[in-house]
Image: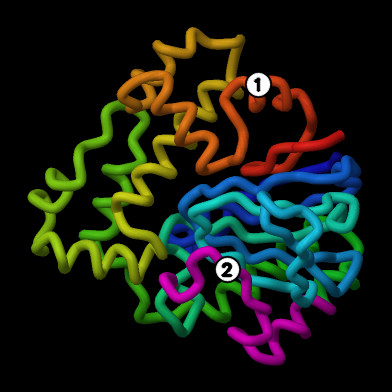
């Protein structure tokens, strides 16, 4: 698998985590996409189709055009990686996709939407251009140019949301939601409403997803861990709590993630069959 990530140019860095390009992707039969708290823009460079299925019901596919916006998911979904081996995409920062969309990000939670429904004919033009490009560098440059052209000049993420996202994303001991509210300029209900519209999930759900991702990162970074210690270090009450959350958010146990970590996949993906 050839997979590269590119840090965006300065006008995009407040909203975009990275732009990525993949070819000769994995060919195992099924891959699970894990919730991460952010949206993505994805283009299939081989076929004008993107197909996903419910992780709990393989074979029940949903089909989209070859360019989509993937909203922030709170549950996993599956893809056939052999049909998505040559791809281009944008991984937004939490809430960052709002800078390029005409609707609240909460409207896209747990869903995909054809990019054409959001950007009109420019979406198909962009896909045609990146498909015809000769190199990954050209594709990444075309994608960045398209994003800059769609960046709303007056857009600025509310500082309260940025601060809340940052607080709930720290690696060690993120604060309780009530403390995030106390430090903001909003009441509890207002913060939830603004955060949900901008990020696509409530602060509580976002915090759960980030805790899961912290634990998963620790699992993927080293040897088989001491599970009880890892659970507490990641913010779970105990090992059983961590296992329940892993099953809810990925459909797999922590041990199953360890068994699959050697299989090459893109960020936020895990192979569920070889």
Q: Is residue 150 above or below residue 260?
A: below
Is 73 in front, or is 126?
Answer: 73
Q: Residue at x 65, y 21 (%)?
A: 258
Q: Which mark is residue 111?
A: 2
User: In this view of the protein, which residue sits in the foreground, 2 or 197?
Assistant: 197
Question: Which image quadrant for residue 95?
Answer: bottom left
Residue 184 shown in magenta: no
The boundaries of the magenta stretch are 105-128
Is residue 115 highlighted in magenta? yes
Q: Earlier in the sequence, mark 1 or mark 2?
A: 2
* Magenta: main secondary structure: helix
Query: In the rendering, at what x and y percent does residue 136 appear?
Result: 82, 56
Residue 106 marker: none
x and y percentages locating residue 154 in the rendered image: 35, 81
Residue that label 1 marks: 258
Q: Quadrant of the N terminus?
A: top right
Label 1: state its secondary structure.
helix
Q: Is residue 234 above or below residue 267?
A: above
The number of callouts visible is 2
Secondary structure type for disc 2: loop
Left or right relative to 150: residue 43? right
Residue 223: x, y in percent? Answer: 61, 10
Structural crowding at the residue carrying mark 1, measured as other residues with C-alpha within 10 Å and reported as few (<14), some (14–19) or many (≥20)? some
Q: Height in image: 42 above or below 120? A: above
Q: Looking at the image, which residue is at 70% across and 82% down?
A: 123
The image position of residue 30, as x and y in percent, is 81, 45
Rendering colour mode: rainbow
Q: Answer with left or right where residue 33 lies relative to residue 226.
A: right
Image-based side of 50 in relation to 163, left or right:
right
The answer for how far apart the CA atoms under marks 1 and 2 are is 28 Å
The residue lying at 27 percent from left, 35 percent from top is 174
Cβ–Cβ under 8 Å for marks 1 and 2: no
């Amino acid at each position: 698998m050839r997979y590269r990530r590119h840090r965006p140019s300065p006008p995009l860095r407040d909203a975009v985590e990275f732009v990525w390009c993949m070819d000769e992707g994995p060919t195992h039969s099924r891959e699970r996409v894990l919730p991460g708290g952010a949206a993505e823009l994805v283009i299939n460079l081989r076929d004008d189709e993107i197909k996903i299925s419910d992780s709990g019901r393989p074979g029940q596919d949903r089909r989209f055009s070859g360019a989509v916006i993937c909203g922030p998911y709170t549950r996993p979904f599956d893809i056939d990686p052999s049909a998505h081996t040559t791809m281009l995409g944008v991984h937004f920062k939490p809430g960052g996709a709002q800078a390029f969309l005409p609707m609240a990000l909460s409207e896209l939670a747990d869903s995909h939407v054809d990019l054409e429904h959001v950007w009109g004919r420019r979406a198909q033009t962009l896909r045609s251009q990146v498909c015809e490009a000769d190199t990954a560098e050209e594709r990444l440059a075309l994608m960045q140019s398209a994003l800059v052209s769609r960046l709303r000049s007056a857009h600025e993420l509310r500082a309260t949301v940025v601060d809340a996202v940052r607080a709930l994303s720290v690696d060690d001991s993120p604060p309780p939601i009530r403390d995030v509210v106390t430090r903001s300029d909003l009441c509890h209900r207002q913060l939830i409403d603004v955060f949900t519209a901008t990020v696509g999930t409530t602060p509580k759900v976002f915090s759960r997803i980030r805790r899961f991702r912290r634990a998963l990162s620790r699992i993927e970074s080293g040897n088989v861990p001491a599970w009880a210690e890892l659970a507490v270090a990641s913010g779970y009450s105990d090992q059983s709590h961590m296992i329940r959350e892993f099953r809810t958010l990925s459909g797999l146990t922590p041990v199953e993630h360890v068994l699959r970590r050697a299989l090459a996949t893109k960020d936020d993906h895990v192979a569920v069959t070889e």
